[in-house]
Amino acid sequence: FKENVLTYFNVQNYLKLERPIVKNCKLIVNGYAGHYLFYYYKLNEKGFNLKIQFGMTNNYAPGEKMMVADGNYQQFIEKQYNVLVLDEFRYLKVYQILGKKP
């Protein structure tokens, strides 16, 4: 049970930290995002310029930053792209895209 709770509250607990590394970052969301929208809007009021993307795409450009908590999405990104992991928090990773893998 505890692991499910940590997973569910992972994004909002990370956003509460207000880490500057997430400025201009996309939140890649799998499903419902309402439980962390408060922190999303709070950080954007402070100039973080976060974006939300529902679902994955295969069109990320070098330099893009993304916050991903879903393990399947993390595997997809790491398989398709050369990435730099900028930060990790429990099950969440913040990536910067370096380029598409051949």
Image (cartoon, helix red, strand yellow):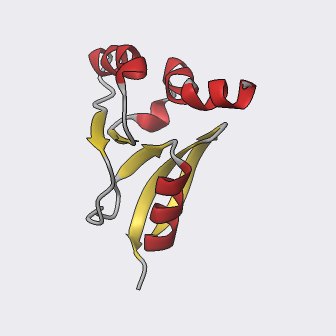
Q: Position of residue 17 (x, y in %)?
A: 55, 21
On the image, the x and y values in percent for residue 76 come to 46, 64
Q: Residue at x 37, y 28 (%)?
A: 33
Q: Which residue lies furthest to the front in this view?
A: 1
| Above or below: residue 79 compared with residue 71 | below
Residue shown at 53% from the left, 62% from the top: 75
**Is the N terminus in the top left, top right, bottom left or bottom right quadrant?**
top right
Total labels: the figure holds: 0
Q: Nearer the viewer, residue 6 or 22?
A: 6
Residue at x 42% of width, y 66% of height: 98
Spot occupied by residue 99 in the image (x, y as percentages of width and height): 38, 71
Compared to 21, does 86 lie above or below?
below
Residue 8 placement (x, y as % from top left):
55, 27
User: Which image quadrant: the C terminus?
Assistant: bottom left
Up the image or down, 75 lies above or below 11; here it is below
Q: In the image, what residue occupies the spot 56% across and 51% down? A: 71
Dividing the picture into quadrants, the one containing residue 88 is: top right
Q: In this view, does 27 lie above or below 14?
A: below
Q: In this view, does 55 lie to the left or right of 35?
A: left
- State the residue in front, 1 or 100: 1
Q: Which residue lies furthest to the bottom in this view?
A: 102
